[in-house]
Image (spheres, grey):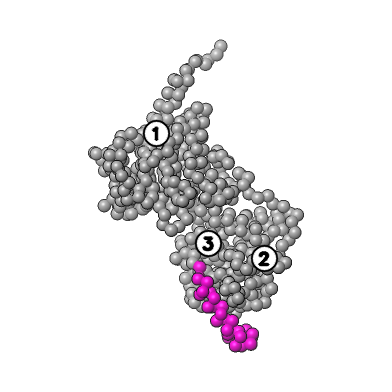
Amino acid sequence: MGLPLFDAHSDPGPSFFHYVEVAGLDTPRSSSAPELPHATTVIAVRYRDGVVMVGDRQATGHYIASRDVRKIEAADRFTALAISGTAARGIEFIKMAQLSFEHYEKMTDSSLSLEGKANYLSPIIQRNNLSSPLMVLPLLAGWDPSHQVGRVFEYDGAGGCYERFDFATIGSGSPFAESALRLGFRPDLDREAALELGALALYEAGDNDPSTGGADFVRNLFPMMVTITEQGFQELASDEVGERFRAINERRTQSGGVAGGTLR
Amino acid sequence: MSNYFYVSPEQLIKDRAEFAQKGIARGRSMVAAIYDVGVLLVAENPSASLNKISEVYDRIAFAGVGKYNEFDRLREAGIRWADGTGFTYSREDVDARALANYYAQHLGDMFTEGQKPLEVEILVAQLGNKIRPTKLYRVAYEGTISDETRFAVLGGDAETIKDRFAASEEIIHPLKETLKNAVTALAGPDRIIETSELEVGILEDRGNRRTFLRLSDPEVSELLS
């Protein structure tokens, strides 16, 4: 690769995605590959000081391929990106987003706005999903420093970007997680309540969706829990997550597996 | 009848070099120096937004002097090259020496074949780690690349500033002393440069992947006090 110099009229600007296209560094798309199942649950819940995200750790094909996948990553200091869909494309997508945000920052000496980041991802998702059956559907959550608020953006398969003001879910366990969130969500949740609700919703998804991994007490592998606040992206320690899931499990055992009544 | 007159290659090179030197001398100079735990880049720059110093990659920084539009395009190309290389291979494969060589080739080509030589000088700084050394690569307008062991001065007044800085920096100091010496060397005996006219960036390990940090005016004042 030589020095990528461009004329003013053909310059791809600070967009890494456009540069990659112009320079031919991207992977070819094909429409002949078989559709692979997308099995995941990731949840984002808005609360008073930001956003809580919870994600399971299981990669599922026709069998459990991995039990410790990280489906939520920091795209930059104030932005978290979660993926559902084909693992290879998802990982490539996260890498592209991380690089793009950093690239923009270095090129222009300023960060993209959170909304700018959310919109930027739309055509990347669109190009991937409309040219290949290897779908990828992300979930973006971040702290918006210019408005001092946590925000959540979800996408449809064609790249449409929608801001959610309460919560959002992606993956095959979504219906179950969504039901729990709908019953438990209140505006102005505090951190503790948001973490509790997120954990419970993921527990529900893990309980009902065969392709969502719940807490694995045997291997001590627990879902990922992160907060994105004014302090940036922070991941909860595995022990703390383990405690939360152990407590839910304990309550469920006491009730004989019944979830109803006051949400437990 | 031909309108071309014979110009000897020596004369041609001399004219082009003079042209480039004049262009570079119109701008202000900059100093890059290795301090005990990092690399310092200081430029005299009256503009707060048209930067001469920039982050390129995790452990690589760029500085340019001379014509802004020319070195800024090279800066952008450097960031693209670094991000593209890291994307294709791995982050640890992005090497400042390779980038400095590309700059040298491009400046050399423009010097001999371009409509006019580029009126810029470029510095590529690398903060060392287990696999690479801390290095300062200086690329001159005609493509000469040099690998400076402790410090480099770029710009029209480079020789004088270099002598002043060398006299005060006989050993490698901490950041505070190095910055003071660099600013004193840039200013010379009869002048004081205001903090607002300084652009300062460092490469230093602070526990993050990215080591570049742009210092704000208050931070620079604090270090200079």
Q: Which residues are magenta?
A: A235-263
- Residue B61 appears in the rendering: no
Residue A249 within the segment the image draws in magenta:
yes
Q: Quadrant of residue A222?
A: bottom right
Q: Nearer the viewer, residue A108 or B12?
A: B12
Vertical relation: B198 (above or below) A230: above
- x, y percent for residue A106: 48, 50
- Residue B66 appears in the rendering: yes
Q: CA distance from mark 3 to mark 1?
A: 42 Å
Using the rendered image, report if marks 3 and 2 lie on a common chain: yes
Residue visible at 45% across and 35% down in the picture: B145
**Marked residue chain, label 2:** A
3 or 2: mark nearer the eye: 2
Q: Quadrant of residue B67?
A: top left
- x, y percent for residue A174: 65, 71
Q: Nearer the viewer, residue B84 or A158?
A: B84
**Of the residues shown, which amino acid type is indicated by label 3?**
Ala
Q: Nearer the viewer, residue A214 or A93?
A: A214
Q: Nearer the viewer, residue A123 or B77?
A: B77
- x, y percent for residue A39: 67, 67
Q: Which residue is mark 2?
A: A65
3 or 1: mark nearer the eye: 3
